Amino acid sequence: MTRTPVKPSSISPEFYEKWTREEMEERVRAIKQALGDKLVILGHHYQKDEVFQFADFTGDSLKLAQLAAQQQQASFIVFCGVHFMAETADILTADHQTVILPDLKAGCSMADMADDEQVEECWDILTDLFGQTIVPMTYVNSTAAIKAFCGLHGGITCTSSNAKKMFQWAFEQKERILFLPDEHLGRNTAASLGLELEEMAVYNPLTRELEHVQTELENIKVILWKGFCSVHQHFKLEHVEKVRKRDPEMRVLVHPECCYEVVSAADDSGSTEYIIKQVKQAPSGAKWAIGTEVNLVQRLAQNHPEQTIRLLNDMICPCLTMNRIDLPHLLWALESIHSGEIVNAIRVPEEVAGPAKLALDRMLALS
């Protein structure tokens, strides 16, 4: 059965819940064919399969934003990810391109843990304590406003893949780093460079105080923002120990957004792209307990039946905000393009986009 197209302005994504999956998929394919090169759909690795299957390009957040910028023929970029990813894509794409997020409620709890007012306040406190000795650095999993802050203060962005290299650059600029918004990636990266845990402190934006101070202030080299990923925080040392006891041959591979104790106990750690690469190049019969988002781990298991692949923590849930992008929302966004009534366009104001791009460009120049 072929459904009659409807105007998105007259409905909500819930309208499509009356349709079968096959009907929605048929309509998505029809719109993709009709729009041709004018449309590019980007799919983050954590997306549901029902959405991921339609992605023209897949990857992590920064890779997808860069790919969006390369698709100069595309007028419309539908980003199946979360809000900060769509913001980054808008910053990096040309003026004639429109970035669309199928559900504006698809946010990131980690990115939301640092807002610009809190960071400005933190900066004032830290510069009173340390003077002009700090370089601000933000994980790309942050809002455009935080990227802009870093750009305006001589700072930089990083990914989980290049964080170590960006740390090295920052230490060439000044004595200390303020790392936003994920304390775990910051701590794990600093430790990988040989810094001691005593050389790190945590800034708590709620109390406006430094925590975990174990040395004189002058010896602190990294100030970590008190933030975390709501998915990766659920992987614990006890899960690694259970795997070791149950099957000593199983390798533990985790994302560096996991806590320091888990990353230290794992056999290996790395970005989403790194995890995928390690599994792809592993021999038949390899065994993995992987500490990252469930949709990705399940997809790896499906694509590599010759290996044993399981979640490090069987009780982990999918990234709830990422999973707000479902087939009804994707179809609703595509219908809006097809009808000329664009919904959920992401536009970063120029006063934010300009300095945010400075921070991104500094990183890209080193990558």
Image: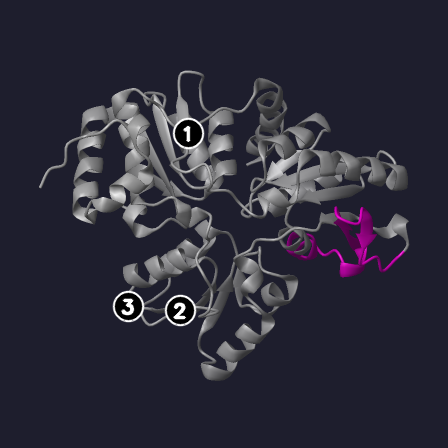
Q: Which of the two discs, 3 and 1, sits closer to the camera?
A: 1
From the viewer's perspective, tell me whether residue 247 is left or right of residue 146.
Answer: left
Q: Residue furthest top?
A: 96
Q: Residue furthest left?
A: 1
Considering only vertical position in the picture, is 151 above or below 252? above
User: Which residue in the protein does label 1 denote?
Assistant: 344
- Mark 3 / mark 1, whichever is N-terminal: 3
What type is the residue that disc 1 sits on? Asn
Q: Label 2: how many residues lie within 10 Å, few (<14), some (14-19) or many (20+)? A: some
Q: Residue furthest bottom?
A: 245
Q: Label 1: how many residues lie within 10 Å, few (<14), some (14-19) or many (20+)? A: some
Residue at left 86%, top 51%? 219
Query: Looking at this view, is 156 or 120 the one in front?
Result: 120
User: Which residue in the protein does label 2 denote?
Assistant: 310
Q: Which residues are magenta?
A: 188-215
Q: Quadrant of residue 59?
A: top left
Measured Cα–Cα span from mark 3 to mark 2: 13 Å
Q: Label 3: how many residues lie within 10 Å, few (<14), some (14-19) or many (20+)? A: some
Query: Looking at this view, is 17 or 357 the one in front?
Result: 17
Residue at left 19%, top 26%? 34
Q: Are marks 1 and 2 in contact (CB under 8 Å)?
A: no
From the viewer's perspective, tell me whether residue 145 is left or right of residue 8.
Answer: right
Measured Cα–Cα span from mark 1 to mark 2: 36 Å
What type is the residue that disc 3 sits on? Glu
* Residue 191 position in % (x across, y down): 69, 57
Residue at left 49%, top 37%? 83
What type is the residue that disc 2 sits on? Arg
Q: Which of the two discs, 3 and 2, sits closer to the camera?
A: 2
Residue 34 is marked as: none
User: Which residue in the protein does label 3 denote?
Assistant: 306
